[in-house]
Image (spheres, helix red, strand yellow):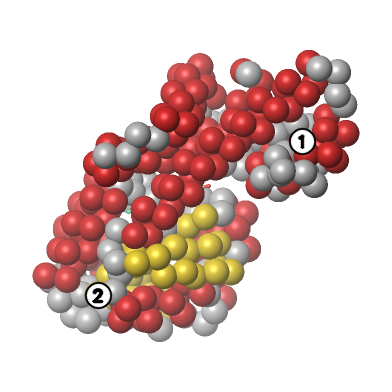
């Protein structure tokens, strides 16, 4: 297929390269000359404007920083420029309301579209092992699925338009909460005289077990290799966790949900980022607890 790819940053760069490896002709655009040059080295065709990249494409994939940018790129550069009938896939993490609005505008302009945010960081984007949670009609999902499968290990239909973003922010709200919980448990265990590895050995096979412990242990030297063993280099930067928690709090308010633990996690990550840790891995919050 001819697939246009807009947004070739930390995540999009690796994803576009995997589409090339799967045999697709990838038509790349990014505002950053460096990102575009790297995409060229990875076998993408590069274009000087998004409108040029998407013209003649069977599908358009976007991986952009936020909802305002997604909305403006689709309105200004994709609708009307991509061929009628192209399938549009936005993989960015954005608010549910904007995702739903952009899909409605796409439908009105004659396109099928899915919101398909990802779980998994830069390493998973490079390795092609992302998990995609997809919102859209059955017909749109059927067309999007094989394209996403070339970049991930799991592609799951979450429901109608916006449902992919809803799944993503609920998942990441839970991640923020259990990372902080894991950090508190390790800090307290240590204050109570337990060796971190011993506590890991016990809790990782007991009812406190969770992903933040067994896949991403926030304590250096305990559990599997993680950013904690690398001076808390990301990984998943605290600023991105805060972004997702803010989106979750926005959605909670819209839905009339009183997410007390999510709210507290957002406050703690806000304080952590305000203290200059936005670029530090999110598990580094253990150093403040
Ligand atoms: P990034 O900042 O590295 O990449 C974004 C890219 O978009 C940049 O290269 C930027 O130049 C480009 N861009 C911005 N405006 C543009 C425009 N108008 N036209 C074309 N290109 C434009 O960010 P990232 O880490 O790759 O994240 C992308 C998305 O993925 C975000 O929504 C983020 O929340 C989500 N995400 C990131 C991670 C992660 O670990 N980094 C994990 C899961 C999801």
> In the figure, 212 relative to 18: above or below?
above
| Numbered tag placed on residue 206 in the rendering | none
Coordinates of residue 97 in the picture (x, y in percent): 23, 50
Residue drawn at x 38%, y 60% as measured from the top left: 164
- Asked whether the viewer can see residue 94, the reply is yes
> In the figure, 37 relative to 45: above or below?
above
Q: Give the quadrant of the N terminus.
A: bottom left
Labels 2 and 1: the sequence-earlier one: 2
In the picture of the structure, the residue carrying the numbered disc 2 is: 112
Coordinates of residue 212 in the picture (x, y in percent): 65, 42
In the picture of the structure, the residue carrying the numbered disc 1 is: 229
Q: Give the quadrant of the C terminus.
A: top right
Coordinates of residue 139 in the picture (x, y in percent): 30, 81
> In the figure, 48 relative to 276: above or below?
below
> In the figure, 212 relative to 124: above or below?
above
> Toward which corner of the image does residue 110 lie, by quadrant?
bottom left
Q: Secondary structure at mark 2?
A: strand
Residue 80 in the figure: left or right of residue 229 = left
């Amino acid at each position: 297929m001819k697939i246009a790819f807009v947004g070739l940053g930390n995540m999009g760069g690796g994803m576009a390269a995997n589409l090339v490896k799967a045999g697709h002709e990838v038509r790349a655009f990014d505002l950053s000359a460096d990102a575009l040059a790297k995409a060229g080295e990875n076998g993408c065709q590069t274009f000087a404007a998004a409108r040029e990249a998407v013209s003649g494409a069977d599908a358009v994939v976007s991986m952009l920083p936020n909802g305002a940018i997604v909305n403006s790129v689709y309105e200004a550069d994709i609708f009307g420029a991509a061929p009628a009938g192209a399938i549009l896939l936005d993989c960015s993490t954005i608010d549910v309301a904007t995702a739903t609005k952009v899909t409605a505008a796409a439908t009105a302009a004659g396109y099928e579209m899915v919101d398909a945010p990802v779980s998994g960081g830069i390493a998973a984007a490079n390795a092609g092992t992302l998990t995609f949670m997809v919102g859209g009609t059955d017909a749109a999902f059927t067309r999007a699925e094989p394209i996403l499968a070339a970049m991930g290990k799991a592609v799951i239909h979450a429901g109608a338009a916006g449902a992919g973003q809803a799944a993503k922010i609920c998942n990441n709200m839970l991640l923020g909460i259990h990372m902080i919980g894991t950090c508190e448990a390790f800090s307290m265990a240590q204050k109570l005289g337990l060796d971190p590895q011993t506590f890991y050995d016990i809790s990782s096979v007991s009812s406190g077990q969770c992903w933040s412990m067994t896949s991403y242990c926030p304590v250096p030297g305990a559990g599997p290799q993680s950013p904690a063993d690398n001076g808390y280099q990301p990984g998943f930067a605290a600023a991105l966790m805060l972004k997702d928690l803010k989106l979750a709090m926005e959605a909670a308010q819209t839905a009339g949900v009183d997410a007390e633990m999510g709210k507290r996690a957002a406050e703690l990550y806000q304080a952590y980022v305000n203290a200059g840790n936005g670029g530090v891995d999110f598990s580094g919050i253990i150093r403040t607890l």
